[in-house]
Amino acid sequence: GAVVSQHPSWVICKSGTSVKIECRSLDFQATTMFWYRQFPKQSLMLMATSNEGSKATYEQGVEKDKFLINHASLTLSTLTVTSAHPEDSSFYICSVISGLAGGPGYEQYFGPGTRLTVT
Amino acid sequence: GQNIDQPTEMTATEGAIVQINCTYQTSGFNGLFWYQQHAGEAPTFLSYNVLDGLEEKGRFSSFLSRSKGYSYLLLKELQMKDSASYLCAVNPAGGGNKLTFGTGTQLKVEL
């Protein structure tokens, strides 16, 4: 399966600053990556779909101007949390997909996650 | 809309068998995933069901009934390391490759 890395694994920042999180597909060319957010003891909530070479597609309720996504290459997508606030503290996880939805080889591989704490 | 339900918590004994249920109501259906997630870590893939029936992989099996909107994950010969959150996720038709996750079931394995 695909190997996905994220950097940093954890970050602490002050309120009002911006934080960039990288998601890399190490052995797989990913035209599509997903960004999720997970609050403690809750499930994963999809934030946006990152498309290589085009604009990201955001889920309802996710502010695109606050969560900037750049998918500049087939192996790298970045999520920038702008003007971070304590309520943005969460576990951010990216994923890549292989195969086609509904097909036998379809699978979604997750990165190790980035723990963001905003003070 | 999408609605996926799982029990919040379950407790089982080491060496036993446990079944974690998942019911879903989605706009179409392209497949259902089960993931395991340990605290502070990313989810890891367990199984993927597209057609009705049982898929077996070692100690883990997953069952799907599309007509009932129902799936279960069966864990046999439970080990302490199986204590984790188990997430049911559905790929709805027309949703591209997106997954909609259930709230997860926190399984605690005791001696």
Image (cartoon, coloured by chain):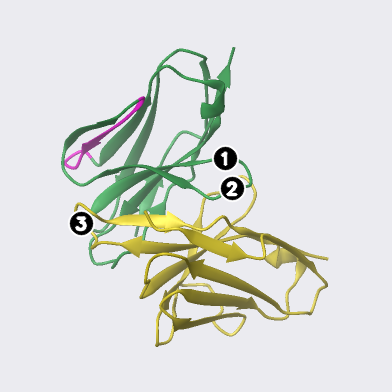
Chain of the residue displaying label 2: B
Main SS category, magenta section: strand
Q: Quadrant of residue B47?
A: top left
Instruction: Read off the magenta span.
Output: B59-68
Look at mark 1 in the image and give the residue it sits on: B38
Q: Quadrant of residue A41?
A: top right
Q: Are marks 1 and 2 in contact (CB under 8 Å)?
A: yes
| Front: mark 2 or 3 | 2
Q: Is residue A109 magenta?
A: no
Report whether residue A87 is seen: yes
Residue A64's mark? Answer: none
CA distance separating discs 2 and 3:
27 Å
Q: Seen in the image, is B74 located left or right of residue B63?
A: right
Residue B84 horizontal/vertical position (percent): 54, 34
Q: Residues within 10 Å of mark 2 (few under 14, many from 20)?
A: some
Look at mark 2 in the image and give the residue it sits on: B41
Chain of the residue displaying label 3: A
Chain of the residue displaying label 1: B
Residue visible at 59% across and 12% down in the picture: B111
Look at mark 3 in the image and give the residue it sits on: A102
Q: Colour of chain A?
A: yellow
Question: Same chain for the residues at labels 2 and 3, yes or no?
Answer: no
Q: Secondary structure at mark 2?
A: loop
Q: Amino acid at mark 1?
A: His
Residue A42 horizontal/vertical position (percent): 57, 48
CA distance separating discs 3 and 1:
27 Å
